[in-house]
Amino acid sequence: MKQKTHPNFIIIGAMKAATTSLYTYLKQHPDIFMTANKEPMFFNNFQKANDFKVHGRKTKKITTFDQYYALFDAVKNEKAIGEASPSYISNEDCPQLIRKYLPETKIIAVLRQPVERAYSNFLHARRADREPISDFEIAFNKQEERKAENWSTLYYYKNKGYYSEQLERYYSLFPKDNIKILLFEELVRNPIETSQEIFEFLNVDNTFIPDTSKKANVSGTPKGIFGWLIMKLRYYNLIPNIQFSSYLPAFIIQFLFKSAYKKAEPLSKEVSKQLTQKIYKEDILTLEKLIGKDLQHWLS
């Protein structure tokens, strides 16, 4: 019987921190295999009922190792084999499960300023018609109430920004040399250089230059009848969950996006600074020491 192929690296998150872009860049490298299903979320769902409350459609879950390992059946001669599930970073059980079943796996995380990340998460949920509340601050502060009512972790906008405690769980289980931390702004401003940094981390040719011209998962809000229609088709699960950027030219993707969505209003600097100082300041200062990166620009 052929031995099951399994990943030797995982992008664990964070959600709305350009992990889809990174996935797209890595997928282009001839020595890297990425699953066709970008977010298997297997370790979130393994041996769990996960009967959470979700506003809108529910997605089909991968819950068995046979299903999970089947995602890697197409591996040929690639040296680096990976998947990207942004929800792994904030789930308390995932580090232990990954350590138990894939102990040699390398871990990659991309971190974004926590309030900016939360707002983008909120806009993403609104765009998909999954978030019934239109005001970000109200939705942000609904977390405890929603947890008590067993809502999905999709809506835990606040908790997902506590990166230091999330990463501590990984650092306590995996060698530090097997963990690579990137910042969202590094990946956005210098996508080629940052991708090559990851190539080096994965021990593949770090001179390869990926095409970084396509933008993935850009946030926006529905515009007009076309935008409303797209939102409802997604709500009722009538649009397949595929990466259209892999099949359609960039100008068509851009045209469709502009036709369906308008640019979202930016979060006010006052609200961002207030929430950062009140909710995340101590965690950011702890995170600086943990990952060895200057994060003072997150606090300003």
Image (tube, grey):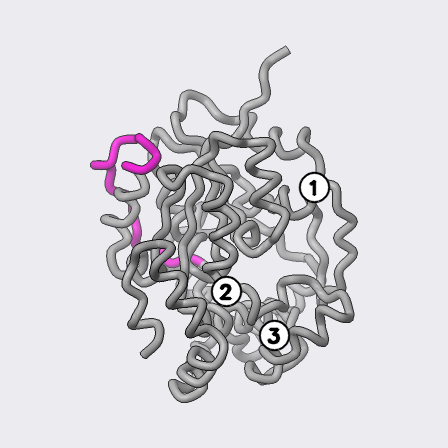
Residue furthest to the left: 207
Image location (x, y in percent) of residue 203? 31, 31
Q: Which residue is mark 1?
A: 46
**Dot 3 alpha-carbon crowd within 10 angstroms: few under 14, some 14 to 19, many 20 or more:** some
Quadrant housing residue 202 = top left
Q: CA distance from mark 2 to mark 1?
A: 24 Å
Identify residue for label 3: 228
Amino acid under disc 3: Trp
Where is residue 107 drawn, in percent x and y?
44, 42
The residue at 71%/61% (across/down) is: 57
Say if residue 160 shows up in the picture: yes
* Residue at the spot 38% in from the left edge and 55% down from the top edge: 290
| Residue placed most toward the observer, 31 or 251 | 31
Answer with mark 2 or mark 3, whichever residue precedes in sequence.
2
Q: Amino acid at mark 1?
A: Phe
Q: From the viewer's perspective, tell me whether residue 81 is left or right of residue 152.
A: left
Point out which mark residue 162 bears. Answer: 2
Q: Is residue 202 magenta?
A: yes
Badge 2 amino acid: Tyr
Q: CA distance from mark 2 to mark 3?
A: 34 Å
Quadrant location of the C terminus in the rendered image: bottom left
| Callout 2 crowding tier (Cα within 10 Å): few <14, some 14–19, many ≥20 | some
Q: Label 3 near label 1: C-beta < 8 Å?
A: no
Region in magenta: 200-216
Q: Which numbered disc flags the more N-terminal residue, 2 or 1?
A: 1
Q: CA distance from mark 1 to mark 3?
A: 35 Å
- Residue nearest the observer in this picture, 197 or 237: 197
Q: Residue 84: x and y, percent?
A: 50, 45
